[in-house]
Amino acid sequence: MAADRRRINGPPGGTAPPYFASSVPGIGDTPIERPVRTRQSNQLRKIFLKTGLAPSASGSAYIELEPSSQNHSHSKTLVTPSSSLKLTCTVHGPRPLPRSAPFTPHILLSTHVKFAPFAARQRRGYIRDASERDLGVHLETALRGVIIGDRWPKSGVEVVVTILEGEEDRWWGDEATGGSTGIGGVGGWGMMNVLAGCITVASAAIADAGIDCVDLVSGGVAALVGSTAPSEKADDAADKRQEKMVVLDPCPSEHKNIIAACVVGYLFARDEITELWLKGDMPGTANTKEGGSGGILEQQNLIDHAVEAAAAARLVLGDAVKEAAELKLRKNASSKQNTSTQDRSTSVDVEMGG
Protein backbone atom coordinates (compact mmCIF):
# COMPACT_ATOMS: atom_id res chain seq x y z
CA MET A 1 0.00 0.00 0.00
CA ALA A 2 1.43 3.39 -0.99
CA ALA A 3 2.12 5.90 1.76
CA ASP A 4 -0.08 8.96 2.07
CA ARG A 5 2.12 11.92 1.07
CA ARG A 6 -0.34 14.45 2.42
CA ARG A 7 -0.10 13.10 5.94
CA ILE A 8 2.59 14.49 8.25
CA ASN A 9 4.24 11.52 9.85
CA GLY A 10 5.28 11.79 13.46
CA PRO A 11 8.70 10.88 14.83
CA PRO A 12 9.49 7.16 14.84
CA GLY A 13 10.41 7.14 18.54
CA GLY A 14 8.43 8.10 21.60
CA THR A 15 7.96 11.71 22.63
CA ALA A 16 7.61 13.37 26.01
CA PRO A 17 5.83 16.61 26.92
CA PRO A 18 7.97 19.59 27.96
CA TYR A 19 8.87 19.67 31.64
CA PHE A 20 8.97 23.22 32.99
CA ALA A 21 10.83 24.18 36.14
CA SER A 22 7.86 26.17 37.42
CA SER A 23 5.78 22.99 37.63
CA VAL A 24 8.22 21.33 40.03
CA PRO A 25 7.20 22.00 43.66
CA GLY A 26 9.78 23.89 45.68
CA ILE A 27 11.89 25.20 42.80
CA GLY A 28 10.26 28.60 42.47
CA ASP A 29 10.54 29.28 46.22
CA THR A 30 14.25 28.47 46.43
CA PRO A 31 16.46 31.54 45.96
CA ILE A 32 19.17 31.27 43.33
CA GLU A 33 22.56 32.17 44.73
CA ARG A 34 25.35 34.04 43.02
CA PRO A 35 28.37 31.96 41.90
CA VAL A 36 31.38 32.26 44.18
CA ARG A 37 35.01 32.53 43.10
CA THR A 38 36.80 29.51 44.54
CA ARG A 39 40.08 30.19 42.74
CA GLN A 40 42.98 32.14 44.13
CA SER A 41 43.38 35.74 43.04
CA ASN A 42 46.32 34.81 40.77
CA GLN A 43 44.78 31.62 39.37
CA LEU A 44 43.21 31.36 35.92
CA ARG A 45 40.33 29.20 34.82
CA LYS A 46 41.15 26.03 32.93
CA ILE A 47 41.58 26.64 29.20
CA PHE A 48 40.77 24.22 26.39
CA LEU A 49 42.42 25.13 23.08
CA LYS A 50 42.49 23.07 19.89
CA THR A 51 43.55 23.91 16.34
CA GLY A 52 42.68 22.52 12.92
CA LEU A 53 38.92 22.12 13.39
CA ALA A 54 37.84 23.67 10.04
CA PRO A 55 39.48 21.81 7.11
CA SER A 56 38.17 24.30 4.54
CA ALA A 57 40.05 27.22 6.14
CA SER A 58 43.78 27.87 6.01
CA GLY A 59 43.88 27.77 9.80
CA SER A 60 41.35 27.42 12.59
CA ALA A 61 41.18 27.17 16.36
CA TYR A 62 38.67 26.77 19.17
CA ILE A 63 38.98 27.98 22.76
CA GLU A 64 36.76 27.38 25.76
CA LEU A 65 37.05 28.47 29.37
CA GLU A 66 35.88 26.52 32.38
CA PRO A 67 32.52 27.82 33.68
CA SER A 68 32.19 29.28 37.14
CA SER A 69 31.59 26.91 40.02
CA GLN A 70 28.21 27.00 41.71
CA ASN A 71 27.57 27.46 45.38
CA HIS A 72 27.41 24.31 47.44
CA SER A 73 23.68 24.59 47.96
CA HIS A 74 20.77 22.28 47.40
CA SER A 75 18.85 24.72 45.21
CA LYS A 76 17.32 22.99 42.21
CA THR A 77 17.25 25.08 39.06
CA LEU A 78 17.61 24.55 35.35
CA VAL A 79 19.29 27.92 34.81
CA THR A 80 23.08 28.07 34.68
CA PRO A 81 24.63 30.40 37.28
CA SER A 82 26.78 32.26 34.75
CA SER A 83 27.90 32.06 31.17
CA SER A 84 31.27 30.81 30.00
CA LEU A 85 33.45 31.75 27.02
CA LYS A 86 33.48 29.74 23.79
CA LEU A 87 35.16 31.13 20.69
CA THR A 88 36.03 29.76 17.28
CA CYS A 89 38.36 31.38 14.76
CA THR A 90 39.07 30.74 11.09
CA VAL A 91 41.86 32.25 9.00
CA HIS A 92 41.51 32.55 5.21
CA GLY A 93 44.69 33.35 3.34
CA PRO A 94 47.19 34.66 2.55
CA ARG A 95 45.63 35.00 -0.88
CA PRO A 96 46.24 37.51 -3.69
CA LEU A 97 44.23 40.69 -3.75
CA PRO A 98 42.04 41.47 -6.78
CA ARG A 99 43.63 43.30 -9.69
CA SER A 100 41.59 46.40 -8.99
CA ALA A 101 43.16 46.75 -5.53
CA PRO A 102 46.12 49.14 -5.22
CA PHE A 103 49.58 47.73 -4.69
CA THR A 104 50.63 47.24 -1.09
CA PRO A 105 54.09 46.03 -0.02
CA HIS A 106 52.64 44.49 3.14
CA ILE A 107 49.94 41.96 3.78
CA LEU A 108 46.44 43.39 4.18
CA LEU A 109 44.94 42.19 7.48
CA SER A 110 41.19 42.27 8.07
CA THR A 111 39.50 41.07 11.26
CA HIS A 112 35.83 40.33 11.86
CA VAL A 113 34.32 39.55 15.27
CA LYS A 114 30.68 38.45 15.42
CA PHE A 115 28.45 37.25 18.24
CA ALA A 116 26.27 34.27 17.41
CA PRO A 117 22.55 34.97 17.90
CA PHE A 118 22.54 32.56 20.85
CA ALA A 119 25.77 33.83 22.43
CA ALA A 120 24.03 35.83 25.18
CA ARG A 121 20.83 35.59 27.19
CA GLN A 122 19.38 38.36 25.07
CA ARG A 123 19.27 37.26 21.45
CA ARG A 124 21.82 39.03 19.27
CA GLY A 125 21.17 40.45 15.83
CA TYR A 126 22.65 39.23 12.56
CA ILE A 127 24.16 42.62 11.67
CA ARG A 128 27.38 43.67 13.38
CA ASP A 129 26.83 46.38 15.97
CA ALA A 130 29.23 48.94 17.43
CA SER A 131 30.59 46.62 20.13
CA GLU A 132 31.51 43.95 17.58
CA ARG A 133 33.22 46.47 15.32
CA ASP A 134 35.10 47.80 18.34
CA LEU A 135 36.30 44.29 19.17
CA GLY A 136 37.46 43.85 15.57
CA VAL A 137 39.54 47.04 15.75
CA HIS A 138 41.16 45.96 19.03
CA LEU A 139 41.90 42.51 17.60
CA GLU A 140 43.45 43.99 14.45
CA THR A 141 45.69 46.21 16.59
CA ALA A 142 46.86 43.20 18.60
CA LEU A 143 47.65 41.10 15.51
CA ARG A 144 49.14 43.76 13.27
CA GLY A 145 52.39 43.92 15.22
CA VAL A 146 52.78 40.13 15.21
CA ILE A 147 52.46 39.10 11.55
CA ILE A 148 55.54 39.58 9.35
CA GLY A 149 53.72 41.35 6.54
CA ASP A 150 56.72 41.98 4.28
CA ARG A 151 56.71 38.38 3.06
CA TRP A 152 53.31 38.65 1.34
CA PRO A 153 53.14 41.78 -0.83
CA LYS A 154 49.76 42.49 -2.42
CA SER A 155 48.15 39.71 -0.42
CA GLY A 156 45.37 39.63 2.11
CA VAL A 157 44.45 37.51 5.11
CA GLU A 158 41.08 37.46 6.82
CA VAL A 159 40.62 36.53 10.48
CA VAL A 160 37.04 35.69 11.46
CA VAL A 161 36.15 35.10 15.12
CA THR A 162 32.71 33.77 16.02
CA ILE A 163 31.62 34.07 19.65
CA LEU A 164 29.53 31.02 20.43
CA GLU A 165 29.09 32.00 24.07
CA GLY A 166 30.18 35.30 25.55
CA GLU A 167 30.62 36.26 29.16
CA GLU A 168 28.07 38.62 30.66
CA ASP A 169 28.77 41.96 32.25
CA ARG A 170 27.25 40.91 35.57
CA TRP A 171 25.32 38.13 37.22
CA TRP A 172 21.96 37.65 35.55
CA GLY A 173 20.23 37.68 38.96
CA ASP A 174 21.07 41.38 39.34
CA GLU A 175 18.62 42.40 36.62
CA ALA A 176 16.71 44.73 38.93
CA THR A 177 19.87 46.65 39.88
CA GLY A 178 21.98 45.77 36.88
CA GLY A 179 21.95 49.13 35.14
CA SER A 180 20.92 50.20 31.69
CA THR A 181 22.25 47.17 29.81
CA GLY A 182 19.88 44.80 31.59
CA ILE A 183 20.14 41.06 31.90
CA GLY A 184 22.78 39.41 29.83
CA GLY A 185 24.03 42.73 28.56
CA VAL A 186 27.12 42.94 26.37
CA GLY A 187 29.46 45.88 26.19
CA GLY A 188 30.89 46.15 29.69
CA TRP A 189 33.20 43.98 31.77
CA GLY A 190 32.43 40.83 29.79
CA MET A 191 33.93 42.40 26.67
CA MET A 192 37.36 42.41 28.29
CA ASN A 193 37.40 38.62 28.65
CA VAL A 194 35.98 38.24 25.15
CA LEU A 195 38.79 40.33 23.66
CA ALA A 196 41.45 38.37 25.54
CA GLY A 197 39.98 35.12 24.22
CA CYS A 198 39.81 36.53 20.69
CA ILE A 199 43.50 37.44 20.78
CA THR A 200 44.55 34.00 22.00
CA VAL A 201 42.38 31.98 19.62
CA ALA A 202 43.32 34.18 16.64
CA SER A 203 47.01 33.69 17.37
CA ALA A 204 46.52 29.91 17.45
CA ALA A 205 44.59 29.97 14.15
CA ILE A 206 47.26 32.13 12.47
CA ALA A 207 49.96 29.70 13.59
CA ASP A 208 47.84 26.80 12.30
CA ALA A 209 47.62 28.56 8.91
CA GLY A 210 51.42 28.68 8.68
CA ILE A 211 51.69 32.48 8.58
CA ASP A 212 55.06 33.74 9.76
CA CYS A 213 54.92 35.73 12.99
CA VAL A 214 57.51 37.22 15.30
CA ASP A 215 55.92 35.46 18.28
CA LEU A 216 52.67 34.04 19.60
CA VAL A 217 50.47 36.74 21.11
CA SER A 218 48.24 35.85 24.04
CA GLY A 219 45.52 37.81 25.80
CA GLY A 220 45.23 38.36 29.52
CA VAL A 221 42.77 40.16 31.80
CA ALA A 222 43.13 41.55 35.30
CA ALA A 223 40.55 43.47 37.31
CA LEU A 224 40.52 45.67 40.37
CA VAL A 225 37.59 44.51 42.49
CA GLY A 226 36.19 46.00 45.66
CA SER A 227 34.96 44.27 48.76
CA THR A 228 31.42 42.94 48.50
CA ALA A 229 30.72 44.13 52.04
CA PRO A 230 32.83 47.25 52.66
CA SER A 231 33.46 48.16 56.25
CA GLU A 232 31.61 51.21 57.55
CA LYS A 233 34.54 52.08 59.82
CA ALA A 234 36.92 52.53 56.89
CA ASP A 235 37.33 56.27 57.09
CA ASP A 236 40.99 56.73 56.30
CA ALA A 237 42.63 56.08 52.94
CA ALA A 238 44.68 53.15 54.24
CA ASP A 239 41.61 51.10 55.14
CA LYS A 240 39.96 51.93 51.82
CA ARG A 241 42.99 50.66 49.92
CA GLN A 242 42.86 47.38 51.81
CA GLU A 243 39.32 46.76 50.56
CA LYS A 244 40.54 46.57 46.94
CA MET A 245 42.16 43.54 45.36
CA VAL A 246 43.54 42.72 41.92
CA VAL A 247 42.42 39.37 40.48
CA LEU A 248 43.46 37.55 37.32
CA ASP A 249 40.92 36.26 34.81
CA PRO A 250 37.88 37.81 36.53
CA CYS A 251 34.40 36.41 35.96
CA PRO A 252 31.93 39.34 36.14
CA SER A 253 29.21 37.18 37.68
CA GLU A 254 31.43 36.33 40.65
CA HIS A 255 32.16 39.93 41.69
CA LYS A 256 29.63 42.51 42.78
CA ASN A 257 31.94 45.49 42.56
CA ILE A 258 34.42 45.65 39.66
CA ILE A 259 36.20 49.00 39.79
CA ALA A 260 38.50 48.73 36.76
CA ALA A 261 39.80 46.12 34.33
CA CYS A 262 42.69 45.82 31.91
CA VAL A 263 43.27 43.53 28.92
CA VAL A 264 46.59 43.20 27.10
CA GLY A 265 47.96 41.41 24.07
CA TYR A 266 51.37 40.19 25.16
CA LEU A 267 54.39 38.76 23.32
CA PHE A 268 56.15 36.55 25.84
CA ALA A 269 59.41 35.94 23.95
CA ARG A 270 59.90 39.62 23.08
CA ASP A 271 58.38 41.03 26.29
CA GLU A 272 56.22 43.46 24.30
CA ILE A 273 52.60 44.59 24.50
CA THR A 274 50.71 44.90 21.22
CA GLU A 275 47.31 45.81 22.67
CA LEU A 276 46.30 47.65 25.85
CA TRP A 277 42.76 48.44 26.94
CA LEU A 278 42.00 50.00 30.32
CA LYS A 279 38.45 50.51 31.48
CA GLY A 280 36.88 51.71 34.71
CA ASP A 281 37.48 54.27 37.44
CA MET A 282 41.11 54.28 38.45
CA PRO A 283 42.33 56.56 41.24
CA GLY A 284 43.99 59.63 39.79
CA THR A 285 42.47 59.36 36.31
CA ALA A 286 39.65 61.83 36.86
CA ASN A 287 41.46 64.20 39.21
CA THR A 288 45.24 64.23 39.25
CA LYS A 289 45.40 66.13 42.52
CA GLU A 290 43.34 63.45 44.24
CA GLY A 291 45.22 60.43 42.99
CA GLY A 292 48.73 61.76 42.53
CA SER A 293 51.36 59.12 41.95
CA GLY A 294 49.22 56.50 43.70
CA GLY A 295 46.82 56.31 40.76
CA ILE A 296 49.70 55.76 38.33
CA LEU A 297 51.09 53.01 40.53
CA GLU A 298 47.71 51.27 40.68
CA GLN A 299 47.39 51.45 36.90
CA GLN A 300 50.86 49.98 36.46
CA ASN A 301 50.04 47.26 38.98
CA LEU A 302 46.87 46.39 37.07
CA ILE A 303 48.77 46.24 33.77
CA ASP A 304 51.45 44.02 35.33
CA HIS A 305 48.82 41.57 36.56
CA ALA A 306 47.20 41.51 33.11
CA VAL A 307 50.61 40.68 31.62
CA GLU A 308 50.94 37.89 34.18
CA ALA A 309 47.58 36.46 33.09
CA ALA A 310 48.64 36.66 29.42
CA ALA A 311 51.91 34.87 30.21
CA ALA A 312 49.97 32.05 31.88
CA ALA A 313 47.67 31.73 28.86
CA ARG A 314 50.77 31.69 26.63
CA LEU A 315 51.76 28.32 28.12
CA VAL A 316 48.51 26.73 26.95
CA LEU A 317 48.81 28.45 23.57
CA GLY A 318 52.36 27.21 23.03
CA ASP A 319 51.50 23.63 23.97
CA ALA A 320 48.47 23.58 21.65
CA VAL A 321 50.45 24.92 18.68
CA LYS A 322 53.33 22.52 19.35
CA GLU A 323 50.98 19.54 19.59
CA ALA A 324 49.28 20.49 16.31
CA ALA A 325 52.64 20.91 14.54
CA GLU A 326 53.85 17.50 15.73
CA LEU A 327 50.62 15.91 14.53
CA LYS A 328 51.03 17.49 11.09
CA LEU A 329 54.62 16.25 10.84
CA ARG A 330 53.59 12.71 11.72
CA LYS A 331 50.81 12.79 9.11
CA ASN A 332 53.16 14.07 6.42
CA ALA A 333 55.76 11.43 7.26
CA SER A 334 53.20 8.62 7.16
CA SER A 335 51.75 9.86 3.85
CA LYS A 336 55.22 10.01 2.27
CA GLN A 337 55.99 6.51 3.50
CA ASN A 338 52.74 5.15 2.06
CA THR A 339 53.44 6.86 -1.28
CA SER A 340 56.93 5.37 -1.53
CA THR A 341 55.58 1.91 -0.67
CA GLN A 342 52.97 2.14 -3.42
CA ASP A 343 55.59 3.24 -5.94
CA ARG A 344 57.76 0.22 -5.13
CA SER A 345 54.85 -2.18 -5.47
CA THR A 346 53.77 -0.81 -8.86
CA SER A 347 57.26 -0.88 -10.38
CA VAL A 348 57.77 -4.07 -12.47
CA ASP A 349 61.02 -5.24 -14.06
CA VAL A 350 60.72 -5.63 -17.84
CA GLU A 351 62.97 -8.19 -19.56
CA MET A 352 64.37 -6.94 -22.86
CA GLY A 353 64.76 -9.59 -25.57
CA GLY A 354 67.71 -9.51 -28.00
Image (cartoon, rainbow, N blue to C red):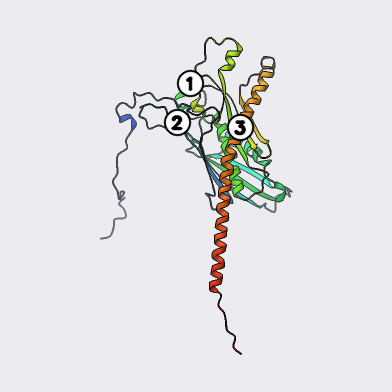
In this rendering, which labeled residue sits more in front, label 1 or label 3? 3
Q: Which mark is residue 69?
A: 2
Above or below 264: residue 352: below
**Callout 2 amino acid:** Ser
Answer whether labels 1 and 3 touch (C-beta < 8 Å).
no
The answer to which quarter of the image holds residue 334 is bottom right
Question: How far apart are the two marked residues, 1 and 3, measured between alpha carbons?
Answer: 33 Å
Q: Could you say where residue 262 lies in the image, as x and y percent from the top left?
A: 61, 29
Q: Secondary structure at mark 1?
A: loop
Q: Nearer the viewer, residue 327 or 203?
A: 327
Closest to the observer, 311 or 85: 311
Looking at the rendered image, the quarter that the N terminus falls into is: bottom left
Q: Examine the rendering and report whether any part of residue 324 can be seen.
A: yes
User: Of callouts 1 and 3, which one flags the residue occurring earlier in the amino acid sequence?
Assistant: 1
**Crowdedness of circle 2 by 10 Å Cα count: few (<14), some, many (20+)?**
some
Q: Which residue is mark 1?
A: 177
Q: Which residue is mark 3?
A: 308
Camera-near label (2 vs 1) is 2
Left or right placement of residue 273 versus residue 62 in this view: right
- Disc nearer the start of the sequence (2/1): 2
Residue drawn at x 58%, y 46% is 321
